[in-house]
Image (spheres, rainbow, N blue to C red):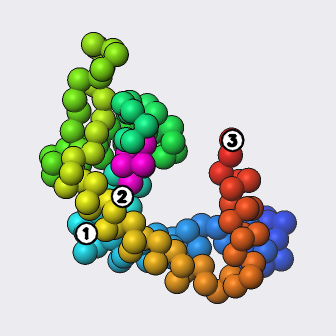
Amino acid sequence: MSLATRHDSADDSPGLLLWQVGNRWQAAQRTALKPFGLTHVQFVLLATLTYLGSSGPVTQKALADLAATDPMMTSQVLRALEGRELVHRPEHPTDRRARALAVTPAGRELANRAVVAVEACDAAFFARLGDDGPAFTAALRRLSRP
């Protein structure tokens, strides 16, 4: 029995293509981040926290929301980053029950070195799009919004 699909070919399925491209992109990012000892999700949270840190205290929820990561996974990854002394959780300045998140100097330095490798990886990976790159990015932006 054949697969009950509306597509004539697997190459016509946008979901399958997105999954395949996503897997290839993730593999490229893993390779780019390996010298820094970071997984991609660790990098995303560390870079996002570094970016947000200049605007004041950051809560775990705000970080997870901006990074679009699962709150439970965010907590686990933050513990790993904290264990490496890349982030810490000082007291929140306005909420005595809460902790803020902050990047340590070592975390900021690592995020700034790693972002260069991540952006170079992106540039190489998406170079095949040529002049279609900005339209592709705009389409991804539309898909990323709820």
Q: Determine the CA span between mark 3 and mark 1.
A: 32 Å
The reply to whether residue 136 is in sight is: yes
Task: Return the x and y of residue 143 as percentages of the image width and height.
Answer: 71, 54
- Identify the residue under disc 2: 43
- What residue do we see at 28% from left, 73% from top? 34
Left or right of 140, for residue 86: left
Task: Return the x and y of residue 22 as percentages of the image width and height.
Answer: 55, 68
Whether pointer 3 and pointer 1 mark residues with C-beta atoms closer than 8 Å, the reply is no
Q: Which residue lies furthest to the top in this view?
A: 96
Whether pointer 3 and pointer 2 mark residues with C-beta atoms closer than 8 Å, the reply is no
Left or right of 69, for residue 94: left
Q: Which amino acid does label 1 sit on?
A: Phe
Q: In this view, does 31 lie above or below 48?
A: below
What element does badge 1 sit on?
A: helix
Whether pointer 2 and pointer 1 mark residues with C-beta atoms closer than 8 Å, the reply is yes
**Quarter where residue 113 is shown:** bottom left
43 or 21: which is nearer to us? Answer: 43
- Identify the residue under disc 3: 146
**Image quadrant in which the C terminus is located:** top right
Q: Does the magenta stretch include residue 119?
A: no
- What residue do we see at 30% from left, 20% from top? 93
Q: Earlier in the sequence, mark 3 or mark 2?
A: 2
Q: What residue type is labelled 2?
A: Phe
Which span is picked out in magenta? 47-52
Q: Which of marks 3 and 2 is in front?
A: 2
- What residue do we see at 39% from left, 66% from top? 115
Q: Determine the CA span between mark 3 and mark 2.
A: 23 Å
**Image quadrant in which the N terminus is located:** bottom right
- Identify the residue under disc 1: 36
Left or right of 33, for residue 13: right
The reply to whether residue 27 is in sight is: no
Q: Determine the CA span between mark 2 and mark 1.
A: 9 Å
